[in-house]
Image: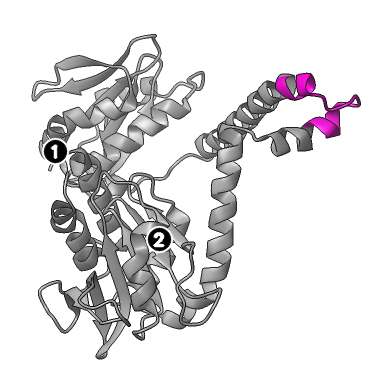
Amino acid sequence: MDFSERLEALALKVRNQASAIETEEATKNAFVMPFIATILGYDVFDPLEVVPEFTADVGIKRGEKVDYAIVRDGEVQLLIECKAALGALKVENASQLFRYFGTTNARLAVLTNGVVWQFYTDLDAPNKMDSKPFLVLDLLDIDETLIPEIQKISKESFDLDSIINAAEELKYVGALRREIAAQFREPSDEWTRFFTTRVYEGMFTAKVREQFSVLVRKASKQFLTEQVNDRLKTALGAGVTVPAEPDSAREITSEQAAEDDLDRNTEIETTLEELEGYQIVKAIACSEVKPHRIVHRDQKSYFAILIDDNNRKPVARLHFNTKQKYLGLLDETKTETRHPIDSLDEIYAHSDAIREAVKRYL
């Protein structure tokens, strides 16, 4: 697997197991050590590369430990402090990292609960760890633009100068994106005033603020929806090219060609929720097959998820066109069973059945 595939595989494990992880030690074993080994590429069983319970006495603080130190060429390059998977990460959790940062050669530090990974450096003052991370990786919602930056920290591609040079922009762009997202979810008074005064000529009174806070929130959601729909229409209009199967693997018949032609309908409207459901099924199926082989094909009555864009190889069907949503799963005889779901997260409860469906075509 390449780097992004390994990251997606670990993310799938986190989605499936995070709710069952209750202690810090369990978090280390289930998520942190696999991240160090499979994503960063260090041997967790080699004390010359990964030092668990790393100790460096700091002033009057004796015997305090950082959970892991990553060593390259005999020098500590990265410090990692862990918390339990269900616990929220706060800067107060990083007290050991702050103290150790200035006593080692490390320019990078990580605070993690195995799900969210916060990366720190010393942009504000030399040899003093910043109070805010320059990069935040959430394995439950991976920002693909950060994958190349994470890869720079891996053993194979480690490039400290490039990491530090990019850190300032990453820090502020990331912080701005999170703040903008927060304002779209729940506009502050300042945000509401900013837009209201540009469209409303009267005084910005308490009553006007109350009225426009609702309108600004509504307008923000509509704007986002329009942007997403525009991108979906562009993507669907451009189409997706999938490598064709060799003739030996897929026999083309007149019946097959007719079915394929009937499946294509220009009046079909693909929704964002269907694409989100597709991404969940794809993430589950990626444990068995390469991601590019899992494709979707929307139809009037259901949204199909297929292997190799072949409707004889269905993985699942999403029936999202009615008030009650259903996940359709097919057995060996192609008999479909519809499972009612109230939220997309419930798809994960059928992970084993989805994987079994994929295995039947391999």
Label 2, residues with CA under 10 Å away: few <14, some 14-19, many ≥20: some
Q: Position of residue 290 (x, y in %)?
A: 24, 50
Residue under the point 29% across and 31% down: 305
Q: Position of residue 90 (x, y in %)?
A: 39, 53
In this picture, residue 207 sits left or right of residue 10: right
Q: Residue furthest front?
A: 60
Residue 257 in sight in this render: no
Name the one closer to the observer, 238 or 212.
212
Residue under the point 36% across and 45% down: 242
Residue under label 1: 361
Scheme of colours in the image:
one colour
Real-space CA distance between mark 2 and mark 1, rounded to the nearest whole angstrom: 31 Å
Up/down of 350 relative to 97, above or below: above
Q: Position of residue 109 (x, y in %)?
A: 36, 70
Q: Residue furthest right?
A: 201
Name the one closer to the observer, 240 or 1.
1
Q: Position of residue 193 (x, y in %)?
A: 77, 34
In this picture, residue 39 sits left or right of residue 181: left
Residue under label 2: 147
Name the one closer to the observer, 144 or 180.
180
Label 1, residues with CA under 10 Å away: few <14, some 14-19, many ≥20: few
Q: Quadrant of the C terminus?
A: top left
| Displayed quadrant of residue 102 | bottom left
Range shown magenta: 196-210
Say what amino acid the circle numbered 2 marks: Ile
- Look at discs 2 and 1 and give the one toward the viewer: 2
Say if the magenta span includes residue 205: yes
Say what amino acid the circle numbered 1 marks: Tyr
Labels 2 and 1: the sequence-earlier one: 2
Say if the magenta span includes residue 20: no
Up/down of 203 relative to 172, above or below: above
Residue under the point 23% across and 78% down: 62
